[in-house]
Image: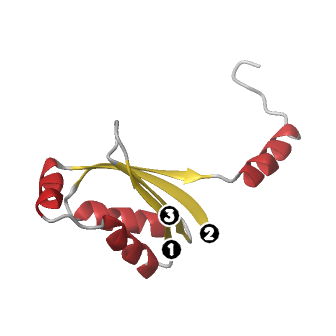
Amino acid sequence: MALYMTQFSYTPEAWAALARNPEDRSAAISALSESMGGRLVSFYYSFGEYDGVAIHEAPDESTVTTIMLAVNAAGHMKTTKTTLLVTVEDTLDSLRKAGEITFRGPGG
C-alpha cells in the first residue's frame, strides 16, 4: 500500500469544540482509514502553517481521496494537503530508470 502524508488545519470552531471537549482525533481518523482498507501510521499536532500531520496507508489514490472528502465534508477542516510519500527504495529504482532515458527539453 502507498503511504500518504496529510497536513491539516482546523477551523477556529473546531479548536473551540476540542477545547470544550478534548478528544483523541487520531482514533476517529484511524477508524475511518481502516473502514476503507487503509491504516493510520502516525498522527501529530504541530506548530506553524499546519495544525497537524497524519501519515496513513491506503490501497490506492481513489481510497485516499474518498477518505479526505469524508474528512473535509465534516466541516471542521480549514485546510488539508495530501502528499504521496515515496520510499527511498522506490526513488532509487526510478532514478536508475531515469538515468537510462534521454529526453529532449524545450528548444533542444
In the rendering, at what x and y percent does residue 26 appear? 36, 66
Q: Disc 1 marks which amino acid? A: Gly
| Residue tagged 1 | 38
| Residue tagged 3 | 56
**Residue at 62% in and 69% down:** 1
**Residue at 46% in and 65% down:** 64
**Residue at 13% in and 60% down:** 17
**Residue reaching furthest to the right:** 100
Q: Depth check: give the residue in front, 33 or 23.
A: 23
Q: Disc 3 marks which amino acid? A: His
Q: Depth check: give the residue in front, 52 or 91.
A: 52
| Residue tagged 2 | 1
In the rendering, at what x and y percent does residue 89 appear? 77, 53
In the rendering, at what x and y percent does residue 40 appear? 47, 68
Q: Disc 2 marks which amino acid? A: Met
Pointers 2 and 1 in contact (C-beta within 8 Å): yes
- What separation in Å lies between label 2 and label 3 (alpha carbons)? 10 Å
- Find residue 3 and name its label: none
Dot 1: element: loop
Dot 3: element: strand
Drawn side of residue 92 relative to residue 12, left or right: right
- Work out whether mark 2 precedes mark 3 in sequence or the reverse, and give the earlier one: 2
Dot 2: element: loop
Pointers 1 and 3 in contact (C-beta within 8 Å): yes
